[in-house]
Image: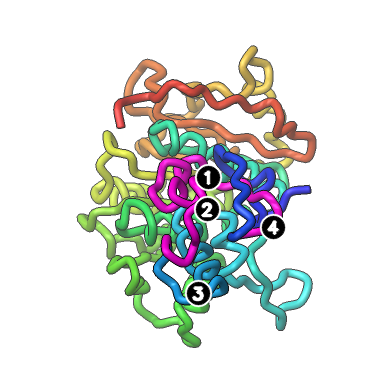
């Protein structure tokens, strides 16, 4: 059974770590931890007290847990990130990834490990699965522990954005969501920007590491001035050739779900494809009205975007992430 605490079947590439002075049961840790000096010293039998320079085993284990959070998103989310319970609005619970959240983020983490370009199109045929929340938390974790850059979330309305601002403020131990269009993150010394597609210009020209266009199927007039401005504000702040993360995410309206079958008919169901829009879009990022997507940057399939289709019959075991990097690290 998947567990964020033991790491079993959690996101990303993992290895088995069994050091009884740290934990009595085996832990499955992110592969990038394996070569770290702390892990190497522990595997050689050195005491955690000397490795983490702690006076007792309890504080040494706590130091290990804090060290692990830098590499293990699922563990960090379950330990530190608190969200509102959908079943009880007055209750707050840790973010333990559900199957769909885990699946999408697992793909992102494995591709990140292999240095594939971080461009994603996520389409789903049902709502309220916590995918937007999971992506928002994942970007925050990357912002703090990895590339240490600004993040940007753009959605259809303030109603969609405010819960994510509230979750972030709760993580930062702030009770009131400020009225500003950004939230300062002290540990990362960076900002998280939140805008609607109607008022996106605040972040124009500010360097971004992570861009999340959420609930795009709810956006009105995807080729209109407001949506074009949202893209312009984000694209002016993103270096397309670098490993920034851009996530396009939205539901698929019922009347247009059959269009997604085009993806499933390929011999590689999850292969990157440059989809042609029936209607020309001025926007190099955007989904059309049925939440399909294209890079639209060149006439050839440039592999810029990776499509993830989530529906009620999706099969997680079908995905295979190539082990060869897309470009040098």
- Point out the tag, 4 or 3, that comes first from the N-terminus: 4
Nearer to me, 186 or 278: 186
Disc on the earlier residue, 1 or 3 = 1
Rounded to the nearest angstrom, the CA distance separating label 1 from label 3 is 23 Å
Label 4 to label 3: alpha-carbon separation: 30 Å
Taking the image as drawn, is residue 258 in sight? Answer: yes
Q: Is residue 43 magenta?
A: yes
Question: Callout 2: 10 Å neighbours few (<14), some, many (20+)?
Answer: many
Q: 20 left or right of 166?
A: right
Q: Is residue 186 magenta?
A: no
| Image position, residue 145 (x, y; %) | 38, 57
User: Residue 171's mark?
Assistant: 3
> Helix, strand or loop at disc 3?
helix
Decide: few, some or many residues near mark 3? Use Cα within 10 Å; few <14, some 14-19, many ≥20: some
Disc marking residue 30: 1
Q: Nearer the viewer, mark 4 or mark 2?
A: 4
* Left-right relation of 10 to 311: left
Q: Which residue is mark 4?
A: 24
Taking the spot 76% from the left edge, 76% from the top edge, the residue there is 88
Residue 238: percent from left, percent from top: 28, 46
Viewer-proximal residue among 276 and 240: 240
The quarter of the rendered structure image containing the C terminus is top left
Q: Is residue 278 above or below residue 23?
A: above
Provide residue 136's location: percent of width, then percent of height. 50, 58
Element type where label 1 sits in the image: strand
Q: Quadrant of residue 50?
A: bottom left
Residue at the far top: name it: 267
Q: Earlier in the sequence, mark 4 or mark 2?
A: 4
- Looking at the rendering, the stretch of residues picked out in magenta corresponds to 22-51
- Determine which of the numbered discs, if any, sits on residue 72 in the image: 2
């Amino acid at each position: 059974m998947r567990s964020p605490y033991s790491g079993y079947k959690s996101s990303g590439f993992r290895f088995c770590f069994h050091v009884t002075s740290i934990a009595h049961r085996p832990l499955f840790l992110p592969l990038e931890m394996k070569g770290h000096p702390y892990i190497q010293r522990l595997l050689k039998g050195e005491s955690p007290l000397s490795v983490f320079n702690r006076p007792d085993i309890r504080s040494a284990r706590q130091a290990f847990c804090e060290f692990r959070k830098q590499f293990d998103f699922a563990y960090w989310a379950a330990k530190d990130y608190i969200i509102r319970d959908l079943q009880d609005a007055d209750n707050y619970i840790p973010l333990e990834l559900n199957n769909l959240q885990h699946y999408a983020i697992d793909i992102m983490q494995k591709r990140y490990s292999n240095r594939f370009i971080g461009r994603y199109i996520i389409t789903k045929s049902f709502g309220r699965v916590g995918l937007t929340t999971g992506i928002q938390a994942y970007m925050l974790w990357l912002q703090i522990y990895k590339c240490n850059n600004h993040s940007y979330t753009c959605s259809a309305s303030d109603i969609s954005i405010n819960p994510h601002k509230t979750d972030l403020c709760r993580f930062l131990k702030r009770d009131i969501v400020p009225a500003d269009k950004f939230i300062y993150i002290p540990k990362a010394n960076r900002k998280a920007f939140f805008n609607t597609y109607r008022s996106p210009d605040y972040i124009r020209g500010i360097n971004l590491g992570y861009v999340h266009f959420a609930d795009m199927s709810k956006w009105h007039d995807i080729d209109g001035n407001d949506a074009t401005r949202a893209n312009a504000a984000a694209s002016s702040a993103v270096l397309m050739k670098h490993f920034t993360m851009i996530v396009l995410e939205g539901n698929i309206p019922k009347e247009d779900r059959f269009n997604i079958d085009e993806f499933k008919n390929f011999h590689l169901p999850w292969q990157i494809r440059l989809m042609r829009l029936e209607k020309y879009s001025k926007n190099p990022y955007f989904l059309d009205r049925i939440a399909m997507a294209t890079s639209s940057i060149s006439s050839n399939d440039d592999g810029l975007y990776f499509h993830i289709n989530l529906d009620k019959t999706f099969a997680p075991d079908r995905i295979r992430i190539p082990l060869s990097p897309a470009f040098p690290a």
